[in-house]
Amino acid sequence: MSQSDIAMIGLGVMGKSLALNLLDHDFAVSGYDIQATHRAHTQEEAIALGKGLYVNAGNLDQLLASLKSPRILVLSVPAGAPVDSAIDSLIEAGLEARDIVIDTGNSLWTDSEARERKYYGKLRFFSTAVSGGEAGARHGPALMASGDLSAWSSIRPMWEAIAAKVDSNGLPLPSFEDGEPCAAYLGPAGAGHYVKMVHNGIEYADMQLICEAYQMMSDVLGMSPNEVGEVFEQWNHGELNSYLMEISADILKTTDPETGQPFVSIVLDKAGQKGTGLWTAVNSLQEGSPAPTIAQAVFARAQSAQKSLRIKASTLIDMPTDCGMNPNNTYEKEAVLAALKDALYCAKISVYAQGFALMKEKSDKENWQLDMAQIAKTWRAGCIIRAAILHQITLAFDAEPTIAHLLFAKPFIRVLSEKSLGWRKTVAQAAMSGVPAPGISASLHYVDTLRTATLPANLLQAQRDYFGAHTYARVDCDESRRFHFSWHDVPREEVEF
């Protein structure tokens, strides 16, 4: 009998968690996975939950027959070919044009656009990027929806029910408390996954910034992991409050049960990556919207993977450094920590500004009309980059929706003015101490470049004209006029296009 509100296809970690979340909010859910063990485990947990109604489907025919019309089916399968394979199988099983299929994987945004075209008239394709990992999916994720607008009215009640919630001050609320849901319809197909891609790029950068602060405290100040964790815990009660700061403090204060050593010291320093940060960095280059901190975060992970090369380099390359301080001097230690705290906050602002600038560039190009305030609201809880600063970003965009750049918002202009000296001191301290800080440095260079009215690109363009006749514009003419200078004693000439 057709009774379920929604179906979940793919009952791995994320799919099962989303299904249980829906049941928790009294929705009727059908579940299917090609692996019988996944189906069995989900059914067991659904029965133990004792909420909603769960239908354990043994095949796609049973799954489709169990759903109310229009049928809503969620795909929680690996991105790429498995998504298309699952959709094609559903069409063969009898999916109809009015039925809704939602891709919740980490799909490339261009794939979502291609799927909307491919399946137009066969079904209503929709996408929802999900952030928050297993815990978020189970108890309240951030949901970035996009695609067929007519489908949103059917999906919206469920997505807003299961999403993370925040109070009027933008602070995360416990599960089942009423508040503003971190779920939003962002635009046409592709928009949601594009926003999630940038989210992940910011995530890469934020993680890198925190790691650089940890290394500064460890290598320059000689602090133990537990001591760094204590500082991070203190910082997490103020303007640097975030999920990533919270878990970093927890990690650094944890002891490895096997060795009794700090847990972080037994973890091999080779970072993995799944590609979304790389996508963001590449796209920033394609769009001409610089995101140098995100790019540096990707490079840092790649260089961390070169472990054997780094070990060899550490024995061969001797570069004198000058720390310029005594780690045992409490006053100087506190001064370094104060500067580092300011640097971390300023760098974080710079990273978010880079990400929002990239989304604005793409939105304008694609005519998505992305609501930047809504995006910031959606990220305030339930996702990996959940942070107190996102409420300030929300207020900035609410106050001035058409602002050209996030760093032009008065609150952030004031913060950079008040805290940038500590930022500069930290970058200088890192350089003089030989401690790599590519993220914190790139963030500062981004802001310094942005606020420089005249850059040395005039020399660069002259170089291009010199060796390649690439032409140049003049400061005393309209920019649309192009000139070429003959570098062999022939006067310049205007170039017609």
Image (tube, rainbow, N blue to C red):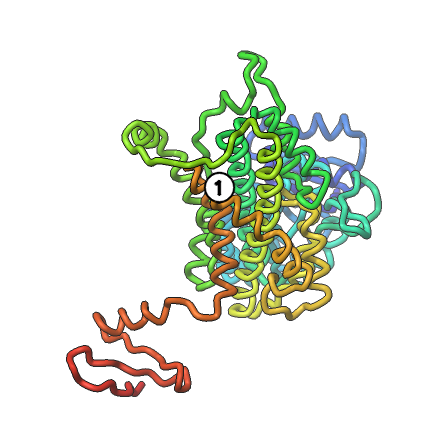
Q: Residue at x 65, y 64 (%)?
A: 409
Query: What kind of residue is marked 1?
Result: Gln
Closest to the observer, 7 or 442: 442
Tell me if I can see residue 396 in this picture: yes
Location of residue 108 in the rendering, given as x and y in whole percent from the top left corner: 49, 52
Location of residue 147 in the rendering, given as x and y in whole percent from the top left corner: 61, 60
Q: Relative to 84, is 361 above or below?
A: below
What residue sits right under mark 1 in the picture? 429
Image position of 286 (left or right of 73): left
Location of residue 407 in the rendering, given as x and y in whole percent from the top left corner: 60, 61
Quarter occupied by the N terminus: top right
Q: Residue at x 64, y 70 (%)?
A: 402
- Secondary element at tag 1: helix
Closest to the observer, 105 or 53: 105
Location of residue 184 in the rendering, given as x and y in whole percent from the top left corner: 69, 56
Image position of 466 (left or right of 28): left
